[in-house]
Image (tube, helix red, strand yellow):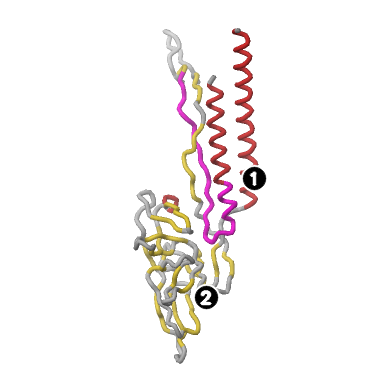
Amino acid sequence: MRALSIASTGMLAQQTNVEVIANNLANMNTTGFKQQRAEFQDLLYQNIQTPGAQTSDTGTYAPSGVQIGAGVRMSAIYRVTTQGDLKSTSNPYDVAIQGAGYFRIQQADGTDAYTRAGNFGLSPQGQLVTQDGLVVQPGIAIPQNTLSVQINAQGQVNATVAGQAEATTVGQLELTRFPNEAGLNAVGGNLYLETAASGSPQAGVPGSTGYGTLQQGFLETSNVNSVDEITALITAQRAYEMNSKVVSAADQMLQNTARLGS
């Protein structure tokens, strides 16, 4: 009976959907996190009678045909890259991106990764680093005798050093864009990697055409909407229950058929 296998694909699909929703809710307070959305598509169809097939020698055709689907499968888990809200922290090393772009981060193996999480700090050498100690590119070193740091909307980093009346420019933060942000590979730790699907990285100065601006003393919050996620969770739960009822009904029908044949 096809209903058993069809309903089982529906249960598997909704199980994946619930897992995606659970991950979204778990990361509601993760800096720079981008919501994910499970997307599905129907499976192959068994064509008992193809739509438009000739039904007689007189030239009549089936207007709709007879097609029986095989169920559903997950086609993608899409990352929604809409802007998250900005939260004030008053930490001079917290930097939020308002608009498009990613910070470029140098990983421990020397390769580049990208992030929207701007909760930075200083290394023992005075370099601007992530919470995991990875250097923010291009490398920016803050002098040890710095009294205050200012980062403007265009990413220019100025430091007021003890004994100097005016601030000194110590570096320039850059932003990186991708033709297809959804194609980035999430590897955890708020980091993404370039892939063939994302396209090549395109570096630019914050505030220039196509790039966002920076806000010192702010962090971008997760773009997860808890109300939407709970609504989606209830819908997924109901869909799972209905598919499980189909499995139970199909099993009961098979039992009745078996008793008739005995």
Mark 2 vs mark 1: in front = 2
- Report the number of discs: 2
- For residue 135, which numbered disc appears in the image? none
Q: Distance between the residues labelled 2 and 1?
A: 38 Å
Disc 2 residue type (three-letter): Pro
Q: Residue at x 56, y 56 (%)?
A: 223
Q: Is residue 139 above or below residue 260?
A: below
Q: In which quarter of the image is the C terminus?
A: top right
Q: Earlier in the sequence, mark 2 or mark 1?
A: 2
Q: In which quarter of the image is residue 244?
A: top right
98 lies above or below 56? below
What residue do we see at 53% from left, 31% from top? 9
- Where residue 126 sits: x, y (%)? 43, 77
Which x, y percent locates residue 247?
A: 60, 26
**Element at badge 1?**
helix
Kindly identify which numbered label has been placed on residue 92: 2
Residue 126 covered by magenta stretch: no
Q: Which residue in the structure is indicated by mark 1?
A: 231
Q: What's the residue at 55%, 59% (across, down)?
A: 30
Region in magenta = 21-47
User: How would you rate the neighbour count of disc 2 (Cα within 10 Å): few for under 14, some for 14-19, many for 20 or more?
Assistant: some
The structure residue drawn at horizontal position 41% and vertical position 68%, both measured from the top left corner, is 135
